[in-house]
Amino acid sequence: VLPLVGADTTVPLTVPREGATSIAYANLDYAASAPALSAVADAVDRALPLYASVHRGAGYLSQVSTALYEQSRIAVGRFTGARDEDVVVITRNTTDSLNLLGGCVPGRVLVLDIEHHANLLPWQRHGADVLAARGTVAETLDALSEALAGAEYALVAVTGASNVTGEALPIAEVVQVSHGAGARVVVDAAQLAPHRPFSLAATGADYVAISGHKLYAPYGAGALVGRRDWLDAGTPYLAGGGAVTNVTAEETTWEPAPQRHEAGSPNVIGAIALGVACTQLEAVTAELAAHDTALRDRLVTGLEAIDGVAVLRLWPDSADPTAVVSFSLPGHDAGLVAAYLSAEHGVGVRDGRFCAHPLLAARELDAGLRASIGLGSTAEHVDRLVAGVAQYLSTGPQASYSVVNGRWQP
Ligand code: PMP
């Protein structure tokens, strides 16, 4: 749908297969980081010769950089369905965004135990209550309602799509239940936004966090978008220049958000990349979702047809999961299978606990494999993974593998 940089990358087959020593890379690890859109790379190329200090410089290039930076803020706001009164804070990534919000929440936080550590540890630090997500979606929503009735919460932190299974609770319903109990909602959309449209206005959610490097922009820029009052009153995320209205030797008066939380010279190029990625993705949301769903279905059907493969689901009834699929081969080492898929098939997947230790522990898994799909993924990539897994189980690896520096290698 949108061209990517490096889409035709060839990788070595460390263990040659049918005489071939290299193969087109089947990147099935988009959930970790996605390659840049060509339009993003072009925008970065155009901006590199122009950038200068933002906000404080009077020179022409400072004015250009400031305009580009602020345009990105607007693009991010549009992409996340920000309301007029919402603020867009440019951050480094989702982790940064949620930690920033952590310094602004004026009360208790409730979070589910299926979250990525980025949406768990900032709240754990604030003494959050952690709710187990079990049973069906309806049962989990009931448990949420019950927990909210039992104490006064300021915030419910919830994923927009699990980084392990692509599943999520229906956000508008989480918002309804939470608002009914007087709690706001922050959505960790790190894994949702690359696959499906998300709108603060449409869902009623109060805050959303995203990462550029999962949205086809390079590393280093993300955003927190949402209600102004907490962000204006909260602890400035970093203490430093650009976030203040006045400083004396004794005390500091802080700017309101977003400047309050953007101390130091910002990542202008990263913000430009993020803004362009948001604008590009916004234009193809329907195609993106269709591609994602078709390949997810192909992948899940392929994996479930193999005896000895277990596909991980959080809820039997969650609707419209994204193309992030984790699975295990009970009795086999996930790290070894992942190394084999790379060395012998040119397939890149992730293995381990996916920064979601409580989720895996609750399902008695010490490690899994995760395949995740993005714009450059094809049916051939999915089929190659499925065939590789089947072959691993039937004939085993061609080479012998050993652990070097903590990773399996042929
Ligand atoms: N939340 C989810 C659901 C994620 O998948 C990730 C990244 N794996 C994060 C948060 C953290 O994103 P980042 O590393 O960009 O801060």
Image: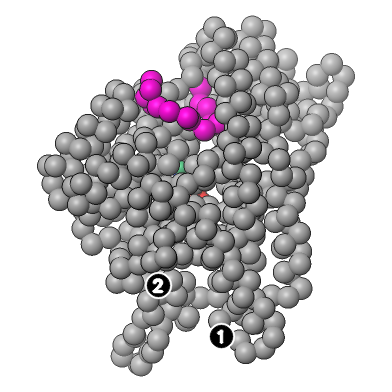
Q: Quadrant of residue 381?
A: top right
**Residue at the (42%, 23%) spot, across then down:** 313
- Asked if 294 appears above or below 48 in the picture, the reply is above
Front position in the image: 406 or 334: 334
Mark 1 lies on a secondary structure that is loop
Q: Which residue is mark 2?
A: 257
Image coordinates of residue 331 in percent, x first then y, are: 49, 13
Could you tell me if residue 372 is visible in this image?
Answer: no
Image coordinates of residue 263 in percent, x first then y, are: 47, 75
**Residue at the (60%, 58%) spot, across then down:** 274
**Residue at the (84%, 27%) spot, across then down:** 21
Front position in the image: 63 or 18: 63
**Residue at the (49%, 19%) spot, across then down:** 311
Mark 2 lies on a secondary structure that is loop
Magenta region's main secondary structure? loop
Callout 1 environment at 10 Å: few (<14), some (14 to 19), or many (20+)? few
